[in-house]
Image (tube, grey):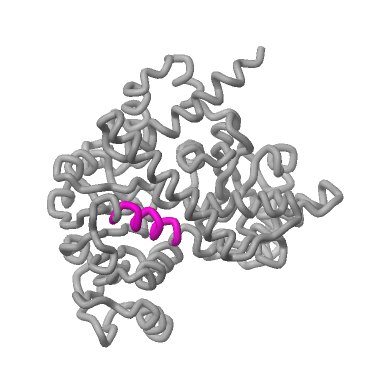
Amino acid sequence: MSAELASPIQREFNPWLAAEARFDEAAERLGLDEGICKILRTPARELTVHIPVQLDDGRLEIFTGYRVQHSIARGPGKGGIRFAPDVTLDEVRALAAWMTWKCAVVNIPFGGAKGGVVCDPAVLSDGELERITRRYTAELVEFIGPESDVPAPDMNTNAQTMAWIMDTYSMHKRHTETAVVTGKPLDLGGSRGRPEATGRGCMIVTWEALRKLGINPSNTNVVIQGFGNVGGMAARLMSRAGMRIVAIIEYDGAIYNPHGLDVDAVARHRRETGSILDFPEAENMDRDEALLLECHVLLPAAKENVITSQNADKIRAQIICEGANGPTTALADKILEERGIFVIPDILANAGGVTVSYFEWVQDRQGFFWNAQLVNGRLEEIMVNAFRDVVGYAEKHKVNNRIAAYMLAMDRVAFAVKLRGIYA
């Protein structure tokens, strides 16, 4: 369905239209030249590949794969590869642009890219997934690499997938090239601190927001939506830093304890029972009601379109830290801004992952690997600087933090484009 034919609700819930609206506002406030805007909107390269793969039962099947390199003005493309039955070129295109802005916000020397293969991993064996991954990589060998485009894991892909990509690429290049991907196993050139990096980044910027608003972290109540890699790790780290995790929300419900949850005990309970519900030291709650609990910090870390025009006026958090991509709609942004809620936007809040991916790339290229203390210390330095840059931009230009993050990112990319000039 086109944007023109979509209903107002469908338009609100379309993250790509929301990103476009924020791009337009940021570009207008920056006073960007029309030609520069066209460059920033348009991907540098879009690839579609059709991958023949022999399935376990002997049948041949054709899978479609995509790789979009949105911008390489500030460095190699950087972005994940997802495997899902509903992957589209439009989705990959939008996610690649998002990566451009995310890398620019934290000021690391990458552009934005994204990839995907249309397949259903739930019905494919490990062998079939390996063959899909290797053939997809072979089709992209000329277009990816440490100096051009560095993939990473995303939805339904993981460290094993990255190992297959690294090995396939290395076989074609006739030498081992670990820096072609990030998110690899530690034994194949992965980085310490990478699995917890996104959650750690959320904790760092939340701490900075609390300091800015004059809230004592030890008196802080936190509600976390999503208890996966990002939300679960953020919960652990925030709890260790002295914050109280009073509620955790998952797809099947929520648990609440006003005195604080033992996060490690909740994780054990879920491993044993398959759910966070019925945790002995908490009461079960409806997940929508839990989202509206009074708290200092709300951390949506699961999916997009969680905070909308339908519930933004009922949110009772002072700070929203967006661990997920696109959890707040553009219409909800306006409501939250009017209510004075401090939003740490996704392209800043969850950029810890791509930052430590950058560290992994640096370590692979140097052949020298850092300990966890060095990784975490450098992550904190970059996240704190990015937080202060975004907030400073917001105050200088009298805009909310999200538009400030877009303005900052676009300004940095536009500056690089102008400085390099147009090759003709």
Determine the main secondary structure of the stretch shown in magenta.
Answer: helix
Q: Which residue range is magenta in the image? A: 200-210
Residue that protrudes farthest toward the right in the picture: 174
Question: Eyeballing the image, is 277 above or below 372?
Answer: below
At which x and y percent is residue 212? 28, 50
Q: Quadrant of residue 50?
A: top right
Closest to the observer: 359 or 25? 359
Taking the image as drawn, is residue 90 in sight?
Answer: no
Q: Residue at left 41%, top 19%?
A: 32
Question: Eyeballing the image, is 390 above or below 206?
Answer: above
Q: Quadrant of residue 77?
A: top right
Closest to the observer: 279 or 265? 265
Q: Residue at left 32%, top 77%?
A: 276
Q: Residue at left 49%, top 37%?
A: 104
At which x and y percent is residue 199? 43, 61
Question: Eyeballing the image, is 176 above or below 18?
Answer: below
Closest to the observer: 195 or 168? 195
Instruction: Based on the picture, tell me whether residue 334 belongs to the magenta stretch.
Output: no
Q: Residue at left 37%, top 39%?
A: 390
